[in-house]
Image (cartoon, rainbow, N blue to C red):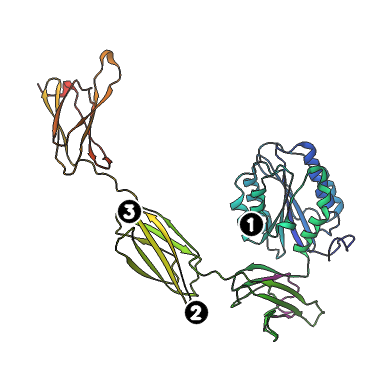
Amino acid sequence: MHSKTCRFVLNCCEGDILILLDSSGSVANHEFLRLLLFATELFRPFSLGRGHVRVGLLQVGTNPHLEFGLDVHSHQEGLQKALQSISQLQGDTNTEAALRVAQRVLTETDEKVPKILLWLTDGVQPGDVDEPMSGMKARGVSVLAVSTVHGNYQVLQRAVTPPLRSHLYSVDIESIDIITEDLRDAIIEIIRAERLRVVHLTSHSAVLQWRPVLSTDSGFYELWYNSVRKTDNGIRRILPGDSTVVQLTDLQPDTTYTAALRPESNQREFNTLSVTFTTLPDVLSPAVVSVSDSGPRQIRVSWGPLQGARVQRYTLEYGAIPSGDVRTLILPGQQNSTVLTGLQPDTQYLVTVSALHVNGKERAMSVRACTQEASLPALTDLQLTQSGRQEIRVAWQAQEGLQGYWLSWEAGSSYGLNPSVSSAYLPPTSLSTRLTHLAPHGRVCVSPVYSSGRGDRLCCTARSHTDWPS
């Protein structure tokens, strides 16, 4: 049943719709009023209330404001008056906070009906909405959006539920009426009372969902499905009367199936529901290999997707580029990451992840990874001793392979000013030096100089002149 052929869309649908209305200061007042008028006309034909269509409205501003909840309006007259009396909030576009409220409104309910978030916005700086939108979609909420031409189309694309053609509209506010019928059709397609729909799809499985019309005691469902390539009757299953969802497994990838669901009851006759879908193309693991948590002597390698039931084992081969020894790890098919240890610092490695699938197929993917440069160690010993009233001897232990030493100290200054920092380079044969006119309690630091850079410094604090024994 489409709105083009149903004059009043009466009794066509059952579902919950929450309008997420951008009421921030970025929306001009005349645009805000046009969005309200648009919503008024969009929902005018629907039968309202529990068992039909429930409509709520949440305003987006600096702080979200729930104008009315899903159970408030069960008649068109009340909904129309409520929409016409809404005042704009102004303020910031805090969409993230509003989405947290929206998720509670739409998902914290026992109602097993389709749920829609309808986002009406100018799309200007909506904030980081990707994560909360994904969270709602993961819980079964369909997201539709209408934006004026100012909107960030990429953000809106990621937010809405496919298909984009009927779930995302970017339109000039003065011409928004032209999308009313198409958007209403899209809403009806989601919340139509009698329909079988695919809510999740992979290369080897599909999840089907339908509106409950039976109970445990009133009957059962008969389900059958088959590939369109086959001519037999396919697979037949009997499902309990309180079922609303079923998962089909062991499907073939990139294959079109038809499924039919018939409610069986002695109380009344129901229509048979059907759906046609195509499984996704097969993806063999590993399809992606990534590197993280890199250190001087270790790296973490991860891969996906995880296909534990389909992969017999993984083989990891890794070696330094260009001619390092290759080491091998054998890992179970249920594992999708491991840490490679005992590596050389500041070295590039080639890592190859190979999967042996239970059907005999093999797939491999390689990635280059670099370990971090090892930190350069500091000296192991530094000593300060008094060699005169105004002089201090600085001494340290020798270390092999150094290019020299970098000495820095806080020197005293005249007229009570803050001490200044002085520094000097000393050759690798120097193991001590003398400093004069140190600042009271001044710090003295020595850093070893390696061929690849300066190491960490080792510091001591000098005692004040009056602290030294006479």
Left or right of residue 105: residue 343:
left
Q: Which residues are magenta?
A: 208-224
Residue contact at pointers 1 and 2, CB within 8 angstroms: no
Residue 374, magenta (yes or no)? no
Q: Nearer the viewer, residue 443 or 202?
A: 202
Label 3 sits on what residue type?
Thr
Q: Nearer the viewer, residue 104 or 138?
A: 138
Figure quadrant of residue 276: bottom right
Q: Where 344 falls versus 242 (above or below)?
A: above
Q: What residue is disc 3 on?
A: 347
Left or right of residue 455: residue 231:
right
Label 1 sits on what residue type?
Met
Q: Nearer the viewer, residue 159 or 264?
A: 159
Label placed on residue 359: 2
Label 2 sits on what residue type?
Asn
The alpha-carbon separation of the residues under discs 3 and 2 comes to 37 Å
In the rendered structure, which disc, 3 or 2, sits on the residue that comes first in sequence?
3
Label placed on residue 136: 1
> Under tag 3, what secondary structure?
loop
Label placed on residue 58: none
Left or right of residue 338: residue 130:
right
The alpha-carbon separation of the residues under discs 1 and 3 comes to 44 Å
| Residue at 48% in and 72% down | 308
In the rendered structure, which disc, 1 or 3, sits on the residue that comes first in sequence?
1
Q: Position of residue 238 (x, y in %)?
A: 68, 82
